[in-house]
């Protein structure tokens, strides 16, 4: 069972989603802009119904515990990319300093 409840009304609505399967449940907080909801549903469905349909789609493809894994993987990927950029910047800085010393 998927229960969607609107909890906030900022620039983008905030929803609390509770997914119950078997004996367990998971809770999720979802933010979706009004523009995105309008674009995806062509104004025919409420944002709550759209969020529920998105969770049904995800549950058709895996267990409730796996819903947030892609978001975690994205954060890990972004962290690795940032670390790689910083290493590249540090290497470039060291190389430029060496070149300056050699050209003197």
Image (spheres, rainbow, N blue to C red):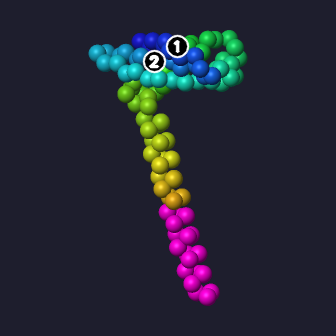
The dot on residue 21 is none
Image x and y of residue 65, in percent: 37, 28
For the residues labelled 2 and 1, say whether their Cβ atoms are less than 8 Å apart: no
Question: Which numbered disc covers residue 6?
Answer: 1
- Is 57 contained in the magenta span? no
User: Compared with residue 90, is residue 51 higher up or lower down, i.e. above or below?
Assistant: above
Q: Residue at x 61, y 11 (%)?
A: 46
Q: Which residue is more in the foreground, 93 or 40?
A: 93
Numbered mark located on residue 17 in the image: 2
The location of residue 64, given as percent across then percent down, is 39, 24
Mark positioned earlier in the residue sequence (2 or 1): 1
Q: Position of residue 38 (x, y in %)?
A: 68, 19
Q: Nearer the viewer, residue 102 or 85?
A: 102
Q: Where is residue 68, by image quadrant? A: top left
Magenta-drawn segment: 87-104
**What secondary structure do most residues of the magenta stretch adopt?**
helix
In which quadrant is the C terminus drawn? bottom right
Between the residue at mark 2 and the residue at mark 1, the CA separation in whole angstroms equals: 9 Å
């Amino acid at each position: 069972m998927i229960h969607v409840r609107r909890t906030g009304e900022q620039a983008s609505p905030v929803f609390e989603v509770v997914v119950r399967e078997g004996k367990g449940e998971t809770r999720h907080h979802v933010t979706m802009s009004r523009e995105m909801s309008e674009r995806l549903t062509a104004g025919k469905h409420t944002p709550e119904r759209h969020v529920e349909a998105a969770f049904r789609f995800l549950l058709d493809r895996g267990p409730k515990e796996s819903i947030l894994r892609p978001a975690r993987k994205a954060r890990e990927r972004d962290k690795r990319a940032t670390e790689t950029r910083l290493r590249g910047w540090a290497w470039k800085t060291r190389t430029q300093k060496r070149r300056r010393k050699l050209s003197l």
